[in-house]
Image (cartoon, helix red, strand yellow):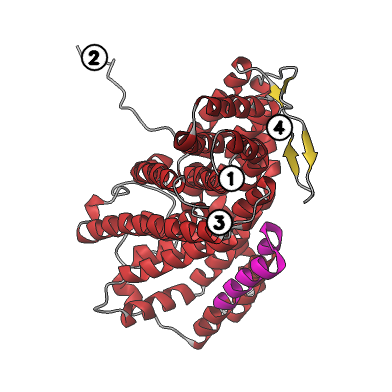
């Protein structure tokens, strides 16, 4: 007799399921962790910061079933600007793909680089994104670039992980190894009431070069491996939302680069130039950049010969294509909302900061890095984490023998690199790339482990330097 009780093969949960489980875990924590909060006050710069020593218990607000789903709904509301920014950015890139500009440019690049190891181009681009992240704090602004580089990597015989890493890892390493990043170093130094010393700036530059070098080697080795044998790709045999061109490298070599394509390419370059100028000179952020990409989509559509109806349908198609990633952004914000509404974020901060009282000297700096990495799970915003943690970490560093310059460096490390590991950052990145979250974790986890060890070593060295 046939046995119908066959074992079901384990299937990795969908990205949405994984995030929902994380939200449920956070909701359970609100029933276990005591509620509490610090008093806040405005500092001289007008920022809301924690008043040291003001932590006190408050009435608990455990999150129930309704609260869980309310957190998801509120997550969409709070991230609406990012969601529409993603759609508008992709609509711009998608128009370039539809009118043949992308294929024409890629064909020209392939023809020009014949006999040249194109992976060196990846190195240059990663360094460029790293510098932009380190100096001007570029991060979310690169969301619209994923389709471009994923498509480019695929056309050149690599996979989506290589293309995505050129942008994501390049810029995230720069953001974490911040030299002049105004959103992290600028805010943290202001709260800590210090000005970065020239010695610390030099040390931060050294850290940036070391981290970026390791990242480039990591991506290079993987790219070389799958270029030789595509079956070695972590995505081999996996269905996922593909971004970019579907043409093979042989087809792209024959793709024409017409006058319309050249004009569209110039408009693309002008748009990126405006983006950089606006962020640096005018302080543009999500809203202004979303408008920029929406306008650019219309302009390249007209230049490329699209009709008004075709331009409108491009926006619809782009929204459809990026909905997976856009929804990830909204759902993942539910993790933070659960912790905030449950009134336990400050309790976690209070408990972690108390841990430092049991250590001294160099060990305290190491513990600060660990604490900041943990805090980033609860507060994924760089400036937000600085506003919450530095009012405590700065005076505490004076008491436990850690230079405030080093305390800010510990914050930069802990805030930046854990964005590559904690679900809120990973889920958003994987969603925008159209990649299964488990595949991206398999790729990024070893690199994060290497980065974490480097953080410990470099923060230890920093405690012995004259800042």
Q: Is residue 288 magenta?
A: yes
Where does label 1 land, which residue?
Answer: 404
Q: Main secondary structure of the magenta part?
A: helix
Location of residue 338 in the rendering, given as x and y in whole percent from the top left corner:
64, 29
Mark 2 and mark 4 in contact? Answer it, CB < 8 Å: no
Task: Kindly report the distance in space between the C-alpha atoms of the residues bearing marks 2 and 4.
Answer: 66 Å
Q: Which mark is residue 139?
A: 3
Horizontal side of residue 202 vs 234, given as left or right: right
Location of residue 337 in the rendering, given as x and y in whole percent from the top left corner:
66, 33
Task: Kindly report the distance in space between the C-alpha atoms of the residues bearing marks 3 and 4.
Answer: 31 Å
- Whichever of callouts 2 and 4 sits on the residue coming sooner in the sequence is 2
Task: Kindly report the distance in space between the C-alpha atoms of the residues bearing marks 3 and 1.
Answer: 26 Å
User: Element under label 3?
Assistant: loop
Task: Kindly report the distance in space between the C-alpha atoms of the residues bearing marks 1 and 2.
Answer: 67 Å
Magenta range: 268-290
Where does label 2 land, which residue?
Answer: 3
In front: label 1 or label 4: 1
In front: label 2 or label 4: 4
- Whichever of callouts 3 and 4 sits on the residue coming sooner in the sequence is 4
**Furthest residue in direction top, as rendered:** 1
Mark 1 and mark 4 in contact? Answer it, CB < 8 Å: no
Q: Which mark is residue 52?
A: 4
């Amino acid at each position: 007799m046939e046995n119908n009780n066959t074992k079901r093969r384990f299937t990795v949960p969908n990205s949405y399921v994984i995030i929902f489980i994380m939200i449920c875990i956070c909701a359970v924590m609100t029933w276990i962790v005591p509620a509490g909060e610090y008093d806040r006050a405005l500092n001289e710069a007008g920022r809301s910061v924690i008043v040291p020593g003001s932590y006190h218990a408050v009435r608990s607000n455990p999150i129930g079933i309704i609260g869980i789903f309310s957190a998801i709904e509120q997550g969409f509301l709070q991230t609406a600007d990012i969601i529409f920014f993603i759609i508008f950015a992709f609509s711009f890139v998608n128009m370039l793909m539809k009118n043949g500009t992308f294929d024409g440019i890629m064909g020209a690049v392939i023809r020009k680089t014949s006999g040249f190891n194109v992976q060196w181009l990846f190195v240059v681009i990663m360094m460029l994104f790293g510098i932009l992240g380190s100096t001007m704090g570029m991060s979310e602004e690169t969301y619209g670039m994923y389709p471009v580089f994923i498509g480019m990597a695929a056309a050149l015989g690599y996979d989506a992980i290589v293309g995505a890493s050129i942008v994501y890892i390049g810029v995230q390493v720069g953001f974490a190894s911040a030299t002049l990043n105004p959103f992290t170093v600028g805010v943290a130094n202001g709260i800590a009431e210090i000005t970065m010393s020239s010695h610390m700036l030099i040390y931060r530059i050294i850290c940036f070069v070391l981290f970026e070098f390791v990242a480039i080697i990591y991506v290079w080795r993987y790219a070389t491996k799958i270029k030789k044998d595509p079956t070695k790709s972590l995505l081999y045999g996996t269905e996922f939302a593909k971004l970019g061109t579907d043409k093979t490298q042989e087809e792209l070599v024959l793709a024409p680069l017409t006058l319309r394509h050249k004009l569209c390419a110039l408009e693309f370059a002008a748009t990126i130039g405006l983006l950089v100028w606006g962020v640096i000179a005018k302080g543009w952020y999500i809203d202004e950049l979303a408008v920029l990409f929406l306008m650019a989509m219309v302009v390249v559509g007209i230049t490329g010969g699209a009709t008004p109806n075709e331009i409108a349908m491009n926006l619809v198609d782009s929204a459809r294509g990026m909905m997976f990633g856009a929804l990830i952004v909204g759902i993942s914000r539910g993790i933070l909302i659960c912790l905030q509404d449950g009134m336990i974020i400050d309790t976690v901060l209070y408990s972690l900061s108390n841990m430092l009282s049991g250590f001294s000297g160099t060990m305290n700096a190491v513990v600060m890095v660990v604490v900041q990495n943990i805090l980033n799970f609860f507060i994924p915003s760089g400036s937000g984490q600085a506003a919450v943690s530095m009012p405590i970490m700065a005076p505490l560093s004076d008491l436990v023998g850690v230079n405030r310059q080093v305390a800010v460096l510990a914050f930069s490390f802990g805030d930046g690199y854990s964005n590559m590991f904690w679900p809120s950052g990973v889920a958003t990145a994987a969603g925008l790339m159209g990649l299964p979250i488990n595949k991206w974790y398999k790729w990024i986890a070893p690199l994060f482990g290497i980065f974490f060890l480097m953080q410990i070593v470099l923060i230890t060295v920093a405690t012995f330097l004259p800042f």
